[in-house]
Image (spheres, helix red, strand yellow):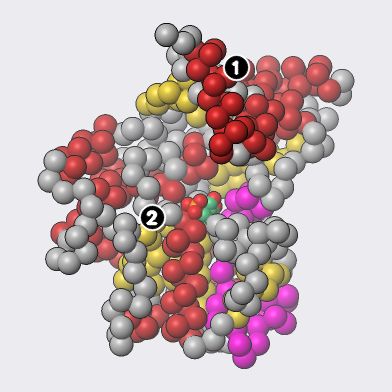
Amino acid sequence: MMNSKEIINETIKKYRCFHNPSLARLYKFAGYNSIEWASEGIYLRDIDGKSYIDCAGGYGVFSLGHRHPEVIQAVKEQLDKMAMSSKLFFSRPLADLCELLAEITPGDLTFSFLCNSGAEAVEGALKIARLATGKTRVISAINAFHGMGVSGKTGLKKEDKPLVYIPFGDIEALEETINEHTAALILEPIQGEGGIIVPPDDYWPSIRKICTERNILLIADEVQTGLGRTGKMFAVDHYGVVPDIMTVAKALGGGVIPTGAFIAKPHVWNCFKSDPLIHTSTFGGSPLACVAAIKTIEILKRDRLPEKAAVRGEYFLNKLVVLKNIYPEVIHSVRGRGLLIGVELAKEGIGGALIPALVRRGVTAGYTLNMPRVIRFEPPLIITEEEIDKVIVILEEAIKEAKKTLSI
Ligand code: PLP
């Protein structure tokens, strides 16, 4: 029988030899050099039984916490009946989920297509935007992240379809960039991987107006911000804006079954009229995923988790501001909305010392793909103020350790 250390070493070796050597290095560098083994509520547990408050939260996946018992129960019950869809008959869970999505999304967002991930939701949204408008050009933002197909980070661009990138938050740049070939503008309401960038309050209402006037579709990518994360059911709700298409994923499957969706207004959905199968997915909308998503939405509404995210997010942010004022040589600024929180460090290298120091003390935090100076806190929306206090105490200890390590 191997002991846990041997199992960890063997697993890391398999990552190096058969999966992704650079990723293995990155995990070790970040202090995540154990094996995830179990999880419950706000806690992750590694193979040695050590607990971590999961403040990375799967980058928004674990909004209900890990393994929410009611989602698990709904999935188990469905598993005993039917797991995958035949794609031949009508599916009751799919019909119920689409109705619920129409109910919780703003305005006349009505029709949903169900898929398995955020990238698929974005890919589908872009496809129907191009079909509905008969145009191909799409505008996105620098440092955006929408999955592999659309990213404002160099090296991840797919140039087979015209994509242009403008600065996030820049209204003039948008007006100048729209031309007769433009089908759509796709934006995250708050940039996640770009470093938790919250735009000015008038940005979304202004771009909504411009998209309507210039006759292009507005796609809100709510894959990370959606379903309560920012303190409203959807981040666009802060601005009273109804996009033409919205993408969701991450939290939708309740942290139990991967699922995503794009939801659109009826005029956009006209593109399915002549061919109902113009966009399809083998696995999307499986009964398992649908019952997980239905239960997730029920819990979000019943337990008022968006409202809780707003209150707890403000509490967390205020505590972080206090730490920033004490340690300006470590923390440059803190920002966010609800429980989507970014901490911009004073220098890029600090994260390499700070995150492992946090992990050693039992708190996870996330890196940011397009802005390495920013670390992210996206805990489950069920986190309590006492638990946030615990995180803050641990963060202060980790800051002190990082200061010592880096001699700052
Ligand atoms: N869109 C946004 C805003 C995201 O943050 C992500 C992932 O982080 C995606 C799309 C892609 O989602 P997935 O990794 O599920 O494909």
Left or right of 335 in this view: 301:
left
Is residue 206 or residue 169 the one in the foreground? 169
Q: Residue at x 50, y 72 (%)?
A: 126
Looking at the image, residue 86 lies above or below residue 355: below
Provide the residue span drawn in magenta.
172-200
Residue at the disc numbered 2? 116
- CA–CA distance between discs 2 and 1? 34 Å
- CB of residue at label 2: within 8 Å of ligand 1? no
Report which quarter residue 350 is drawn in.
top right
- Given contact means CB atoms under 8 Å apart, are the residues at marks 2 and 1 in contact? no
Q: Residue at x 56, y 38 (%)?
A: 19
Q: How many marks?
A: 2
Q: Which structural element holds mark 1?
A: loop
The verdict on residue 138 being magenta is no
The verdict on residue 185 being magenta is yes
Q: Residues within 10 Å of mark 2 (few under 14, many from 20)?
A: many
Marks 2 and 1, the one that precedes in the sequence: 2
Q: Position of residue 48 (x, y in %)?
A: 48, 13
Q: Which structural element holds mark 2?
A: loop
Q: Position of residue 191 (x, y in %)?
A: 61, 55
Q: Amino acid at mark 2?
A: Asn
Residue occupying the far bottom of the picture: 180
Residue 361: which disc?
Answer: 1
